[in-house]
Image (tube, helix red, strand yellow):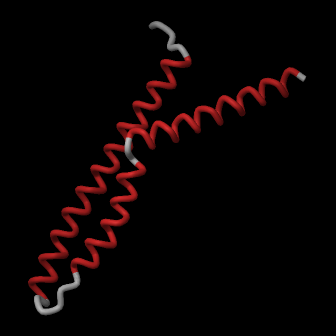
Amino acid sequence: MGEELTLEEFKEALKELRVSRARRDFLSHLISYIIVNAFLIFINLWTSPGAIWFPWVLAAWGIGLAFHYFGSRPSSVIEEAEKEIAMIEYRARRRKKSAEQ
C-alpha cells in the first residue's frame, strides 16, 4: 500500500475538506437565493406591480444568507474543526485511560 499519514496531515486534510464543503454549501445557497428571488421579483412585478413585496423576501432571506456566509468563512470553519478535533482527542485519551485502569 502507500505511505501512512501522520495525525497532523490527517488534521490538515480534514480542515481543507471542511473549508471546501462550507464554500460549496454557501455557493449553493447563494445560487438558490439568486434564482428563487429573481423568479419572485418577476412574479411580483407581473401579477401586482402596484404592491411591491419582493424586497421583504430578499431582505429576510438575505439575513440568513449573510449568517451562512459568516459561518462558512475559512477562519470560522477551521476554528470549528479544531474544536471538534480537540474534543475527539480528549475523548480518545479518556477512553484509553479508562481502558488501562
- Seen from this angle, which residue lies furthest right? 101
Going by the image, does 33 lie left or right of 41? right
Which residue: 52% across, 41% down?
Answer: 80
Question: In the figure, residue 85 lies in which quadrant?
Answer: top right
Q: Position of residue 73 (x, y in %)?
A: 37, 44
Going by the image, does 25 lie left or right of 33? right
Q: Position of residue 35 (x, y in %)?
A: 19, 63
Going by the image, does 84 lie left or right of 95? left
Which residue: 90% across, 23% down?
Answer: 101
Relative to 1, residue 65 above or below: below
- The total of numbered circles placed on residues is 0
Observer-nearest of 77 and 17: 77
Question: In the figure, residue 60 lies in which quadrant?
Answer: bottom left
Which residue: 41% across, 33% down?
Answer: 17
Relative to 18, residue 63 above or below: below
Observer-nearest of 44 and 63: 63
Relative to 62, residue 69 above or below: above
Q: Position of residue 55 (x, y in %)?
A: 23, 77
Which residue: 39% across, 37% down?
Answer: 19
Relative to 24, residue 39 above or below: below
- Seen from this angle, which residue lies furthest bottom? 50
